[in-house]
Image (tube, rainbow, N blue to C red):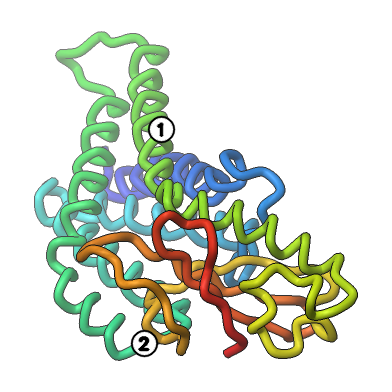
Amino acid sequence: MHLSSQRMLGLIIGLILGLGYAVTSNYVNEWVMPGIPLFVPWPGRFGVIVLTTAVFGFLGLLAAWTDESIPGILLAGVAGSLLTSIWIFMTATSNLGGVFTLLALVFLPRMFFYVPFGWLVRWLMDRLSPHTHRTTAPVQRWASVLMGFAVVSGLGLFALHGEETRLSLKRMDDLLREGMQATSREELPAPLQKVEGFLQNAQGAYSYEIGSNPDVLPVQRPIVEYGAEEPFIIIKFSNGFRFGCVFSPPYIVPACIKF
C-alpha cells in the first residue's frame, strides 16, 4: 500500500473509532440520568463530539504516518496525551496550578491509553489491506472494524459519573426544584437558605457542573474518612447567577453557598 493511501486509511479508521467514543462518552450520563441538565463546555455537545472525532481521526493519521508500526503508534500516544492535557487544562474551572501539575505528572501514564489506540489502528489497517497470502472476505475484514468500533465505544462508558456523584446530582436537582417553588426564605430547603440571593436570582434555565476541588468552596462540612468521595456541584443559571454545593456522605444534605 502506498504511504498516502496508508495514511488516508488510518485517518478513516481513526474517525470511525473516534465517533463511537465521542457519542458514548458525551451521552452516557444523559442516558443514565435523564432530566438532569449537565453543563457542557464550549462548543456544546455536538461541537465536542465533532472535535473529539476529529482528534481521534488525527491520531489515526499519526499512527499510520510511518511505514513502521512502532514509531507511528508512539507518535499517536504522545500526541493524544498532549492534546487531551491541553483540553483538560483549558476547561478547568478552578485550581489551574494544581491541574497543570497533575497533568504534568500523569503525562506519560496517559500515553498508555493512546498507545493501544494507535496499535488498534495499525492492526485494523493490516486487516483491511489486501495481502497476496490471505483470502479473507471483505465482510470479515470490515467485521474487525465493527468490533474495534464497539470496543472503543465501550470505553466511553467510563465517562459515567461515579455512584456518589450521580446520587448527589439527583438529590441536588430535587432540592433545586423545591427551592425554585419557594416564595420566602423560610420555605426554602435548609441547605439553600444559606445561598445569598437564591430567591431573587434562581430563575430560568440552569445546569450542573462537577467541580474538581471541593475545598475551594468556603463552607463547613462534616469530617469524612480519608479517600471518601465528596462531589462538588456548581449550579449555573442562564442569568449568570451561580452557587456551589458539596455533598458529603451519606450524600443527602449538602453544604451550599454563593461563590
Position of 256 with respect to 85 (left or right) is: right
Q: Rate crowding at label 2 as few (under 14), some (14 to 19) or many (20 or more) other CA atoms within 10 Å.
A: few
**Dot 1: element:** helix
The picture quadrant where one finds residue 235 is: bottom right
Position of 68 with respect to 28 (left or right) is left
Q: Is residue 188 visible?
A: yes
Which residue type does callout 1 highlight? Answer: Phe
Q: Amino acid at mark 2?
A: Asn
As drawn, the label of residue 190 is none
Whether residue 12 is visible here, answered yes or no, is no
Rounded to the nearest whole Å, what is the CA distance between mark 1 and mark 2? 36 Å
Residue under numbered circle 2:
95
If the image is split into quadrants, where does the C terminus sit? bottom right
Residue named by callout 1: 149
Residue sitting at 29 percent across and 62 percent down?
80
Which residue is at the front of the view, 166 or 16?
166
Give the image location of residue 254, x and y in percent. 53, 68
Residue at x 60%, y 40% (from the top left corner) = 31
Compared with residue 4, is residue 177 higher up or lower down, i.e. above or below? below
Q: Is residue 187 left or right of residue 59?
A: right
Q: Residue at x 84, y 75 (%)?
A: 203
